[in-house]
């Protein structure tokens, strides 16, 4: 019963909905089951019957729907006679009597119940009515269930009284402990679901099921079946090497969802049986009253039922560091869904109480909480293969197909030449082994692992190997704003005072009191962007304000005084590091005072200010005020003891409370800093607030807002001790009212009225220093940066223009969009967005996931950065997930592919460059490997066609693929990046590994090596009449030497070999000479050469090899010249 589950009677339900419900219940309540002699109503039919009665009893709109029915409809649907039999459940019988009474008494058309029942069955109904006489006297439907428990929901649209009533709890008594077991059984424990752990065996299996590895395993099985254990051993060595490397990386990924458990709050304060107690948070149930105090972590999703200046930091869910004010008011809305940031009446599991206190009734626990949904989203995101995995898998399939075709062709050709069938099958398998580059998987894995180490040295920690290559194909970077593009802390940027002076701050976010200062600008300097503003400072030579209370401009000092002591934050030094404590905005205001050389100690100790009252900020007033008493004000330029009301808040709200403003002072006599506030000189007296002045303030406020600044107005009021009030209190008595601003004993003179306006201060979470340059590099590399934030759209757009995500001169207004607006778009509408937005504001976790998926559907390779739990599902769904290492939560780090150790967005540009270099190198060694193995294929197939003895045995092929393939290929894997790598456009992630040009290079190089080797082999057999083993050894040495030299030629696919520094890659020299040494040992060392069926090569043979190398270089240079010409077009 949804209407009951949501709190009792629900008036004004939609009539059309009730009409459809009535139709559905009537349709279902007549279903029967059983044989002809044992026909009875189904359980579902009886449930529909009872629901029909309950809705008719409770909901007027449902009764209207029943009134439209005729007797025949109800006669056939109700089947009252079948619900009156002896074997029918008593609840159903009682329901039947209640329904009969309601129909006959409430609906004129059904006044005679006899019309609803067959004549020969009316006697049973009469007996039943007599049996339930009490129901007729006081008709009530029996309860469908013993306990109607509300479903998990936020209930932001329900008032507090109703929510408490729904959960059968109270603010003072809480739940009775006797009901807790029942509620735990129904709702489950307040724990996040534990993710299944991957066993070591499953991780090993994940490595072995790679397509290319399966090919190698199949080849090993075949060679073992043919009793060729030497070949099998070599294949197994390659398989084991790849598995070990891949397993090491996947082992770390098993921590991904385990990190969610660390976010669960271990204990909670609750009210049960009228007693406040501390319990294990896992035992919380919906209906529990939890006590929330400053610094506490919220133990479950709650509906706020009591609030005293309660503010909650929800950055873990929304990504924004500013505390959110909470209250008990219900929110009227047309939708059942609100963005988390707008749920002012709710607090969410694992968020933190920043200020104030309150109570909440638990409405969602465990997996039903917001954080629990994120856990489910992470587990539900399907893991997809990265581009390089897909490409290598596709390449492997083509190679298998080629191997199968060649095997069949060789066997058919051999049989046609009347060779032994078994021998030809063995040769066909040897040829298949030639097709498959055994070193491809291992070298790819090792190359990416080397890239991981390089990136770690540059503060980019890679958690999954394929992520390294995928970075190279990234076309979009979706970045969280707070803490990623910006510093994640508020700092003062500008201060405008009532005398129309403009000040700016240096080192705005530095917490160190000794760093930064204040610079004076004439009001003609208006900040356009952070950088252009700094440029204007350098050009204009602004005046530095001395950190001296005797020489500081009076308006500025007044503004800094209000910023400093109308403030509850602090800056402390912990472990040799300065940190802000409290609301980030208030920390920013305190920093403004610090830049001027002021601290709370100066005002409270040196100047004798005593705080006697505070009216905390709330979202309705949008103001905060404090009252300070100054008993000895003579040193401040005033002759009487006074009290000061200091206020800050939203400019438009503060101006409504002001009647005056500080004047411009044009005096030839010196004006002391305190004179403007406390002095009694005529020219220092405040001026009446005029429409003209209000327009000036509005203009300045709009200008600051357009730059993305958070703006606060500053004001004050002086209360003289001779301003007597019947409710006037002493400082001693008023101190006890600090936390009870609504107390009736508060002096009305302390109200936020009749204030004097001082000025505006603009704060910002500024961009990180290197971000703008990093975004410029991204654009140059063909990568679009998209900002995704929970902040206001105006602030987000201003920051985006400031750092270059949006071109300030771009007139297009579609570049920024709200998350809620994007969520309403259909899939086709998203595709039609031209251009795709660069800024997403007011975004929820679900929005982030949809944005990533929409970009992927448009064919993009997407990287998602972030630091909060809210980013984790989108990070996992993206092609590359990038988490912040310092500010990031553990769950985000574990879900990501890459973690930035320094939280610097610019590190992403470095990572992209490394990713491109890795893919570039992978492409180089793939071309190299396929050229080498292609040469073997062409050579052996050519010999098979002309019925010549094959030049290589299977063990020779495997030996060649290990010494000639792996070391040079690994050396190519660490080849330094080419100069233009970050000026290229991103690769199409859907294109294959090889394009037309690289395929032609492979065919050309493999053909040249194959034909040169074939020539040497055929001359040795036919002209020099060499023994078959001598000719095979010469052919083997020729091809391996050419392949090793090909390693040098493959260091660049376009540039000339003669323009590539020979010593530019020392590992290539080591790898090539190491492989060449292995070749010499395999040829000349007795015993070893016998094992490989090789013989020493004479000096003349080496001369032939040298000629082959010259031929290879000539053709390679021709091919590269063609590539350069194609690239430069």
Image: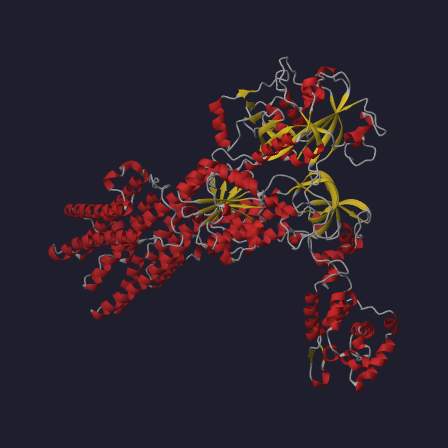
Considering every residue shown, the one lying at the far left of the view is: 1023
Picture quarter with the N terminus:
bottom right
Query: Left or right: 907 with respect to 296?
Result: left
Residue 139 drawn above or below residue 654: below
User: In the image, is residue 385 above or below residue 544?
Assistant: below
Colour logic:
secondary structure
Q: Quadrant of residue 73?
A: bottom right
Which residue is at the front of the view, 1094 or 199?
199
Whether residue 643 is situated above or below residue 670 in the rendered picture = below
Name the residue furthest bottom: 120
The foreground one among 165 and 575 is 165
Residue 1083 position in % (x across, y down): 23, 48
Residue 104 left/right relative to 659: right
Percent position (x, y) of residue 544? 55, 20
Q: Position of residue 214 (x, y in %)?
A: 40, 59
Does the rendering let one see residue 764?
Answer: no
The residue positioned farthest toward the top in the image shown: 669
Residue at the (33%, 44%) spot, across then down: 972
Q: Nearer the viewer, residue 969 or 17?
A: 17
Q: Is residue 1024 visible?
A: yes
Q: Tell me the residue at 32%/47% (across/down).
A: 924
Residue 538 placement, left or right of 559: left
Q: Residue 97 is drawn in which quadrant?
A: bottom right
Q: Give residue 116's position: percent from left, percent from top.
A: 78, 80
Question: How many numbered markers are drawn?
Answer: 0
Q: Nearer the viewer, residue 719 or 325?
A: 719
């Amino acid at each position: 019963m949804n209407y009951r589950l949501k709190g009792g009677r629900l008036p004004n339900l939609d009539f059309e909905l009730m009409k459809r419900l009535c139709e559905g219940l009537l349709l279902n309540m007549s279903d029967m089951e059983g044989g002809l002699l044992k026909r009875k109503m189904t359980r579902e039919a009886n449930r529909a019957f009872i629901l029909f009665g309950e809705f008719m009893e409770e909901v007027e709109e449902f009764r209207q729907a029943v009134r439209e029915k005729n007797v025949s409809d109800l006669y056939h649907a109700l089947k009252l006679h079948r619900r009156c039999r002896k074997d029918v459940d008593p609840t159903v019988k009682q329901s039947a009597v209640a329904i009969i009474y309601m129909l006959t008494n409430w609906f004129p058309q059904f006044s005679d119940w006899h019309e609803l029942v067959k004549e020969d069955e009316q006697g049973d109904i009469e007996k039943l009515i007599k049996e339930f006489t009490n129901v007729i006297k006081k008709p009530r439907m029996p309860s469908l269930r013993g306990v109607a428990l509300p479903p998990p929901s936020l209930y932001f649209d329900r008032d507090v009284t109703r929510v408490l009533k729904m959960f059968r709890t109270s603010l003072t008594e809480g739940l009775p402990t006797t009901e807790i077991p029942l509620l735990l059984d129904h709702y489950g424990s307040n724990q996040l679901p534990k993710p299944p752990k991957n066993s070591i065996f499953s991780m090993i299996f994940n490595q072995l099921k790679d397509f290319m590895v399966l090919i190698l395993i199949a080849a090993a099985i075949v060679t073992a079946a043919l009793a060729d254990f030497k070949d099998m051993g070599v294949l197994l060595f390659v398989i084991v090497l790849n598995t070990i490397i891949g397993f090491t990386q996947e082992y770390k990924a098993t921590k991904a969802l385990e990190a969610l458990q660390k976010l669960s709050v271990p204990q909670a304060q609750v009210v049960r049986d009228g007693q406040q107690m501390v319990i294990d948070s896992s035992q919380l149930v919906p209906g529990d009253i939890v006590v929330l105090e400053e610094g506490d972590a919220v133990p479950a999703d709650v509906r706020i039922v009591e609030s005293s200046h309660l503010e909650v930091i929800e950055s873990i869910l929304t990504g924004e560091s500013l505390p959110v004010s909470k209250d008990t008011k219900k929110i009227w809305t047309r939708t059942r869904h609100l963005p988390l940031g707008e749920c002012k009446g709710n607090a969410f599991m694992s968020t933190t109480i920043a200020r104030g206190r309150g109570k909440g009734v638990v409405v969602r626990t465990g997996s039903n909480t917001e954080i629990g949904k994120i856990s489910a989203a992470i587990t539900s995101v399907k893991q997809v293969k990265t581009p390089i995995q897909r490409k290598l898998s596709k390449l492997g399939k083509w190679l298998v197909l080629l191997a199968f075709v060649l095997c069949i062709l060789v066997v058919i050709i051999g049989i046609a030449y009347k060779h032994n069938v078994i021998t030809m099958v063995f040769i066909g398998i040897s040829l298949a082994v030639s097709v498959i580059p055994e070193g491809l998987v291992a070298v790819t894995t090792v190359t990416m692992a080397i890239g991981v180490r390089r990136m770690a040295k540059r503060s980019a920690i890679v958690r999954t190997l394929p992520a390294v290559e995928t970075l190279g194909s990234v076309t979009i970077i979706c970045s969280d704003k707070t803490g990623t593009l910006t510093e994640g802390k508020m700092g003062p940027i500008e201060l405008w005072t009532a005398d129309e002076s403009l000040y700016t701050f240096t080192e705005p976010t530095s917490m160190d009191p000794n760093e930064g200062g204040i610079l004076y600008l004439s009001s003609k300097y208006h900040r356009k962007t952070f950088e252009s503003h700094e440029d204007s400072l350098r050009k204009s030579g602004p005046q530095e304000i001395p950190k001296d209370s005797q020489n500081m401009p009076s308006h500025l000092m007044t503004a800094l005084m209000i910023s400093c002591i109308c403030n509850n934050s602090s800056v402390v030094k912990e472990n040799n590091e300065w940190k802000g404590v409290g609301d980030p905005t208030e920390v920013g205001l305190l920093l403004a005072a610090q830049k001027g050389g002021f601290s709370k100690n100066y005002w409270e100790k040196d100047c004798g200010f005593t705080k006697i009252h505070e009216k905390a900020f709330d979202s309705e007033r949008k103001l905060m005020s404090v009252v300070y008493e100054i008993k000895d004000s003579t040193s401040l330029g005033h002759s009487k003891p006074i009290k000061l009301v200091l206020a800050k808040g939203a400019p438009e709200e503060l101006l409504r409370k002001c009647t005056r403003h500080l004047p411009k002072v044009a005096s030839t006599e010196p004006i002391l800093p305190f004179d403007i506030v406390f002095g009694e000189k005529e020219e220092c007296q405040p001026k009446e607030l005029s429409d003209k002045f209000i327009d000036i303030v509005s203009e300045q406020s709009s200008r600051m807002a357009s730059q993305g600044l958070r703006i606060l107005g500053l004001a004050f009021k002086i209360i003289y001790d001779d301003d007597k009030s019947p409710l006037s209190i002493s400082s001693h008595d008023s101190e006890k009212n600090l936390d009870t601003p609504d107390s009736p004993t508060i002096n009305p003179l302390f109200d936020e009225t009749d204030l004097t306006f001082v000025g505006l201060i603009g704060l910002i979470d500024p961009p990180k220093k290197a971000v703008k340059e990093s975004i410029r590099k991204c654009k140059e590399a063909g990568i679009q940066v998209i900002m995704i934030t929970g902040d206001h759209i105006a602030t987000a757009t201003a920051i985006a223009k400031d750092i270059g995500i949006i071109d300030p001169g771009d007139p297009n207004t579609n570049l920024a969009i709200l998350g809620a607006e994007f969520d309403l778009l259909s899939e086709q509408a998203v595709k039609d967005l031209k251009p795709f937005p660069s800024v997403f504001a007011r975004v929820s976790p679900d929005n982030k996931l949809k944005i990533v998926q929409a970009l992927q559907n448009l064919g993009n390779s997407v990287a998602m950065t972030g630091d909060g739990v809210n980013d984790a599902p989108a990070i996992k769904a993206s092609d590359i997930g990038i988490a912040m290492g310092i500010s990031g939560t553990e769950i985000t780090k574990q879900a990501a592919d890459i973690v930035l150790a320094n939280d610097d967005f610019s590190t992403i540009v470095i990572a992209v460059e490394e990713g491109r270099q890795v893919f570039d190198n992978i492409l180089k060694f793939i071309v190299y490997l396929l050229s080498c193995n292609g040469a073997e294929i062409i050579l052996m197939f050519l010999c098979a066609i002309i019925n010549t003895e094959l030049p290589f045995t299977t063990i020779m092929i495997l030996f060649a693929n290990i010494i000639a393939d792996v070391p040079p290929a690994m050396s190519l894997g660490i080849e330094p990046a080419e100069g233009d790598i970050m000026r290229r456009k991103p690769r199409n992630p859907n294109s294959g590994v090889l394009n037309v040009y690289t395929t032609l290079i492979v065919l050309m190089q493999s053909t040249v090596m194959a034909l040169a080797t074939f020539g040497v082999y055929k001359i040795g057999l036919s002209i020099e009449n060499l023994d078959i083993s001598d000719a095979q050894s010469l052919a083997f040495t020729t091809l391996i030497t050419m392949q090793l030299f090909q390693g040098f030629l493959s260091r660049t696919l376009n540039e000339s070999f003669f323009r590539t520094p020979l010593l530019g890659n020392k590992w290539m020299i080591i790898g090539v000479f190491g492989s060449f040494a292995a070749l010499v040992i395999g040829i000349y060392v007795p015993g070893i050469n016998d094992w490989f069926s090789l013989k020493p090569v004479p000096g003349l043979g080496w001369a032939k090899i040298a000629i082959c190398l010259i031929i290879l270089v000539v053709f390679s240079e021709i091919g590269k010249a063609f590539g350069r010409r194609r690239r430069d077009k």
